Amino acid sequence: MACHQHGFLTNRSCASSLVQVVTNYKIILKTHGSLDVVFFDFRKAFDQVPHALLLNKLASFDIPPLFISWFSDFLSSRSFSVKVNSTTDPSPAPIFSGVPQGSVSGPLLFLLFINDLLISLHSIPHLHIAAYADDIKIYSHLPSSLQAGIDLVSNWAVSNDLPLAHSKTSLLRLGALNPQHQFHIVGSPILVSNSVRDLGILFEPDLKFRAHIKKSVSLARLRSSQILKSFKSNNPAFYSFLFKTYVLPILEYASVIFCLAPSSPLSRLLESTLRIYSRKTLQRCNIPFSSYSHRLELLSIHSIRHRRLKAQLLLIYKFIDGASHFPNLNSFIRLSSSPRRPMTLINLSPLSDNFFSFIVPIWNVIVANVNSFLSPTQFESFLDTAITRF
């Protein structure tokens, strides 16, 4: 179902998917005190899709026969050869499965192929689903619902010739009241993991992201050190460009899910790479400075905290504007009906520890004196000066 799928769809991203699942995790934990999450791994999913079954599924969507015939021609008569050095196998082997990767139609065909699995999972009471292409996870506070979902996924994989890598199926237990129920897949127990990588983010049972942030900072510091060792220049703009290009993506990937107070140890840790890099860069360029904020001004770069907060505020704007997908948004926030403060948000779950409870108070302070709803371009420009107070 489209509401659960974030891969290869308009206005969906890893960030929107992660914000949604972390928000749901925390709401369930707030209510029930326990949650189990199972992460599935399909073996070479895009290469395994059987063509005949895929075409049959396309017909169930009432796709016109002409288009199905076009897709049939698109998938058929494909072959592969093995090449070693300059020698190529003279007899190509036919390809009977898989959607062509790198094509426009390939991702769409895969999403249509697994759509019936998401629909079936949705019918299980108290079971939650999240998917990003072939990365599928299910979670519930009820062991019976989660086991039913595990069995359904396993049976679907067999009947659809899309095998699971059972050894890579992971279980993450959350919550102080977790009953430690043993889950099984095809008769074998699913091993409990202390941390699971989901869409590039390391998840731990406390949802604090300590391990992920520490690993990201370690890699960012290494990359910064490599830059300073590899390049010699007295131009600060050059070093700023290198940092923005090669280091910031490491620190900022999906950082919108990090709801960190400015003075928290993890927030300071994320900031430390830029603190060190900015100091060493200006010292190398023989440019005097008085403080961290002065260094950032000289390098024309905002702090990591500033950039993360801006990304969070832009994301919530996109949720409101419909430019990014968040299902059932009106269950979490709504715009105030005040004509004098048209951008003020009402948090419908203020006592929950989630993305909205963290960012809505900051949003409301920032837009308090805005008397009209800003366009996306206006809002982004407005944030650069408004965030300086935080």
Image (cartoon, rainbow, N blue to C red):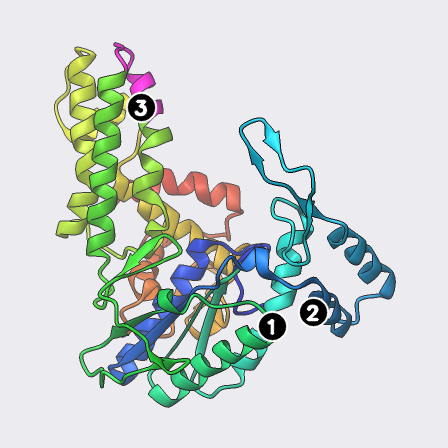
Q: Which residue sits at x=64%, y=41%?
A: 81
Label 3 sits on a secondary structure element that is: helix
State which region is magenta: 231-242
**Residue type, mark 2 in image:** Leu
Give the number of the mark in front: 3 or 2: 2
Q: Is residue 370 visible?
A: no
Q: Of callouts 1 and 3, which one flags the residue occurring earlier in the amino acid sequence?
A: 1
- The residue under label 2 is 53
Instruction: Give the residue displayed 28% in from the left and 72% down from the top.
Output: 191
- Quarter of the image where one finds residue 119: bottom right
Amino acid at the residue labelled 1: Asn
Q: Look at the picture and state if 178 lies above or below 359.
A: below
* Number of other residues with Cα within 10 Å of mark 2, as a class: few under 14, some 14 to 19, many 20 or more: few
Q: Which mark is residue 174?
A: none
User: Which quadrant would the N terminus be assigned to in this image?
Assistant: bottom right
Q: Is residue 175 above or below residue 219?
A: below
| Residue designated by label 1 | 160
Q: Does the residue at mark 1 contact the one at mark 3 (Cβ under 8 Å)? A: no
Q: Which mark is residue 240?
A: 3
Residue 278 x %, y %: 20, 26
Q: Earlier in the sequence, mark 3 or mark 2?
A: 2
Q: Residues within 10 Å of mark 3 (few under 14, many from 20)?
A: some
Q: Quadrant of residue 304?
A: top left
Please provide percent x and percent y for residue 343.
45, 58
Farthest right residue in view: 66
